[in-house]
Image: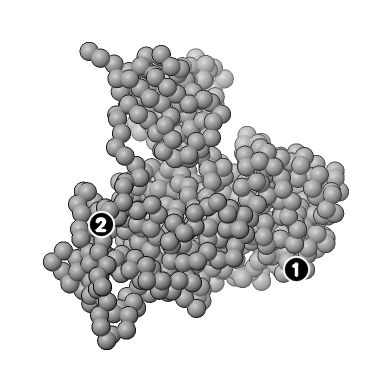
Amino acid sequence: MTFSYRYRGENDETVEVHVVPLDGAEECYRVTVGEQVFELSARCLHRVAFLKVEGEITLQYAGKEYHLSDAKQQRRIASRAAGDLRAPMAGKIIRVFVQPGDRVHVGDILLILESMKMEQQVTAPLDGIVERVVHAGEQVAAGTELVVLQAATG
Amino acid sequence: MQKLLVANRGEIAVRIIRAARELGLRTVAVYSEVDRHALHTRLADEAYLLGAAEPSQSYLNSARILDIASACGADALHPGYGFLAENAAFAAACMDAGLTFVGPTPEAMRQMGAKIDAKDIATRAGVPIIPSYHASDAACLAHRAPQEAERLGYPILVKASAGGGGKGMRIVRTPNELLPALEAGTREAQQAFGDATLMLEKYIENPRHVEIQVLGDAYGNLVHLFERECSIQRRHQKIIEETPAPALTPELRERMAEAALRLAAAVHYTGAGTVEFLLAPDGHFYFLEMNTRLQVEHPITEMVTGIDLVHHQLRIASGAKLAFTQAQLVQRGHAIECRVYAEDPARGFLPATGRIAVLHEPHGPWLRIDSGIAVYDEITPYYDPILSKLTSYGSNRHDAILRMQALLRDYTILGVTTNRQFLLAVLASEAFARGETDTGFLERHFAHWQPSAPLSAEILALAALAETLQRRGHRAAAIQPTASGTTLANPMTPWQRYDGWRLGDRQ
């Protein structure tokens, strides 16, 4: 029996990993990573903490934390357009300075998001026209769409 | 004192509830809607809902807290730190309601809370403050500035009298830079605050933040419990503290402690308090402010003195005399505290939220963890991002550092981004080992820090092995949610998808 995985690391590279239980040796496995072969026992995981949520893997080993993702699962955060501004952290919208139809310039403060007693200004990444914007007082999760800007033409 | 209400949350509420229980008191927790199943709520003998998550509806809702105290028959209240801890009006309201407020008198809180008053009181008590010059108007300033700058001694800081936040602020190093700085500063101050008035202040380069812990009773007895150095700060917030301070000589320690005691005596201080100073490289020190409450970093003082500050706060509040004299206090060994925050140091220390899926808090001799969290807790954006405090003790600084490094390597929180790796990098740095800590330390050495853990074949192999064992149902018990209230309360939460585990945790 072989367990196969495809992991995506930094730079979007993917690597195939195969795990085969070894006969006759309890809790021993042959793990093949690309060209490299490891023989590991379950004991190797005694100092490993492992978490997989929606295809995103976090692993802590010898004090270091590693992040990789399951390339067989769809990525949680799809690529997005430049004028699409999402909440960098969960929090509450405490001020909104623009409304739909407003023309804004790069660096203009669009709104202020507050989280854990810290205020974060969200500024325009490009010159454009505000299409949609959240309302002041709203509670938002990390990744929530805050503002959609239509890039100015010409 | 029979029944104590703890008007706080997180690790400090847990800490206070434990101490109160040790002294035989009944304990009452209060909680917001999102803290319904939090550690402090579960730990206390009784717990009452305050309201919605927002602090104004919950932990800052003083009327509601007083109602609960009255309804449940509490006779004392401990405010912890933050929230209502330094609110003199709240302390007075507690007293009016017949509750013992565990802290100083409202009058002492008021005097130390108003920055200008506190500096006047300090000056009268012979405690040095940062020399400054305030002009009555712009013309007067322009006329007097050169002489005053000479008197203060370069470098000096030009800043707006009306505001903070760095607006209109300029460092002037030589006399010929002074007039241009005044002109530009005046313009900026006018624009930012509608008030062009400037002030001059001596600029302290590369200061250390050193504070003195004091403890007083209601009978005029006052002692200090030595210093803490808290220079490692990000955005003016401390993240690593230690005691003894690497830069203090016994003679300097003595002078700073005496200054702190003079200030505390001037306001008839009772309970635990902290006098904060800036310490310049030349050995001069200047009063910053007094915190009229228990400090976040109090555990390191407890480690080196063997004194439980919360026990003594409670005893003093119930009318007892100080149980020891200054001569009985000794500073023994070295202690370091690291604050674990839910934040991302690689992205400007942005707060992080999420659910704690894996939590491992190592135990061992000379380690202490003050924790306010449990596995499966949701970290919300409503409160301060502190998750826990790690404290290590050693017979000397080197041992305390080694122990803290090991603790930080083993301590595990997965599911929420924390500053653990950043703390570890600081503790492992040469500059920290040399004790070259000042308030510019992180800016100087760690401004562009990124976690450097490139994926290797070994790591990929370990990930695949972990997944395989999990799939085969290996150590299934380790990945099942524990019987925690949080899990029961959220039957809709897809726990099956949080496959967090840690093999070493078995049995």
Horizontal side of B6 relative to A47 (left or right) equals right
- Measured as percent of width and height from the top left, residue B249 is found at 48, 62
Q: Is B271 situated above or below A113?
A: below
Local packing at callout 1 (Cα closer than 10 Å; few below 14, some 14-19, many 20+) is few
Residue positioned 37% across, 55% down in the render: B422
Callout 2–callout 1 Cβ contact below 8 Å: no
Chain ID of residue with mark 2: A
The residue to which callout 2 is attached is A7
Q: Is residue B12 visible?
A: no
Local packing at callout 2 (Cα closer than 10 Å; few below 14, some 14-19, many 20+) is many
Q: Is B99 situated above or below B318?
A: above
- Measured as percent of width and height from the top left, residue B280 is found at 45, 48
Q: Do the residues at discs 2 and 1 belong to one chain? A: no
The residue to which callout 1 is attached is B23
- Measured as percent of width and height from the top left, residue B14 is found at 64, 60
Q: Under tag 1, what secondary structure?
A: loop
Residue positioned 42% across, 43% down in the render: B350
User: Picture quarter containing residue B175?
Assistant: top left
Q: Amino acid at mark 2?
A: Tyr
Residue lying furthest front: A1
